[in-house]
């Protein structure tokens, strides 16, 4: 049984007035963490920069402006050239990125094949998670 859906793609870090910087990015979805998507930006020389946000937010952001605070998403364009814009902020800084929306949509579709919408709670083992948190087990 498949436990995860991973995909590498290239996002663009937008830093005006310079040309966009290409960032290799790993998208990860885990059955055991069914509400979240993990996005890891591979930067040089700083190393990987992980972000985690809800799969539902990503899905909404592909169709309309979504999110408040630290993570905001909005689509632009249509067809094969459509883009998803991401604005990420943290105490360490702010980044604006752009990703190919069709590639993200295909990856997201595969996550919903693994765990359908509204069935995420069925994947959770609350007793095991609580024990892990209380006893520090991996």
Image (cartoon, rainbow, N blue to C red):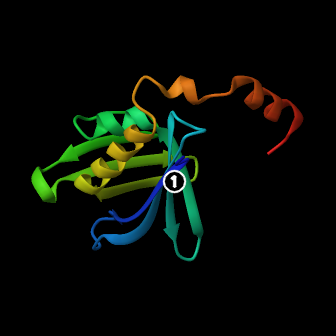
- Judging depth in this view, the residue of 70 and 30 nearest the camera is 30
Give the residue furthest to the right: 135
Residue beneath the point at 30% across and 38% down: 61
Point out residue 52 in the picture as x, y percentages from the top left corner: 53, 44
In the displayed structure, would residue 21 be above or below residue 111?
Answer: below
Q: Quadrant of the C terminus?
A: top right
Q: Position of residue 124 (x, y in %)?
A: 62, 28
Side (left or right) of 130 relative to 91? right
Which residue in the protein does label 1 denote? 93
- Quadrant hosting residue 122: top right
Residue that appears at 36% across and 55% down: 96
The answer to whether residue 50 is left or right of residue 128 is left
- How many labels, in total? 1
- The residue lying toward the viewer, choosing from 68 and 56, is 56
> In terms of image quadrants, where is residue 64?
top left
Does 10 appear above or below 31?
below
Residue 11 horizontal/vertical position (percent): 35, 63
Give the side of residue 37 with respect to residue 125, left or right. left
Instruction: Identify the secondary structure beneath mark 1.
Output: strand
Estimate how packed mark 1 is, as few (under 14), some (14 to 19) or many (20 or more) residues with alpha carbons within 10 Å.
few
Query: Residue 82 location in percent, x, y?
Result: 17, 53
The residue lying at 29 percent from left, 51 percent from top is 106
């Amino acid at each position: 049984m498949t436990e995860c859906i991973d995909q590498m793609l290239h996002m663009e870090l937008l830093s005006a007035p310079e040309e966009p910087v290409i960032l290799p990015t790993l998208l990860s979805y885990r059955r055991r963490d069914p509400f979240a998507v993990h996005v890891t930006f591979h930067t040089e020389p700083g190393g990987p920069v992980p972000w985690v946000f809800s799969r539902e937010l990503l899905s909404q952001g592909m169709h309309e402006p979504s999110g408040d605070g630290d993570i905001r998403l909005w689509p632009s364009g249509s067809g094969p050239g459509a883009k998803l814009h991401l604005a990420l902020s943290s105490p360490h800084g702010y980044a604006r990125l752009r990703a190919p929306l069709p590639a993200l949509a295909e990856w997201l579709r595969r996550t919903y094949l693994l765990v359908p919408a509204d069935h995420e709670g069925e994947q959770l083992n609350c007793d095991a998670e609580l024990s892990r948190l209380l006893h520090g087990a991996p």
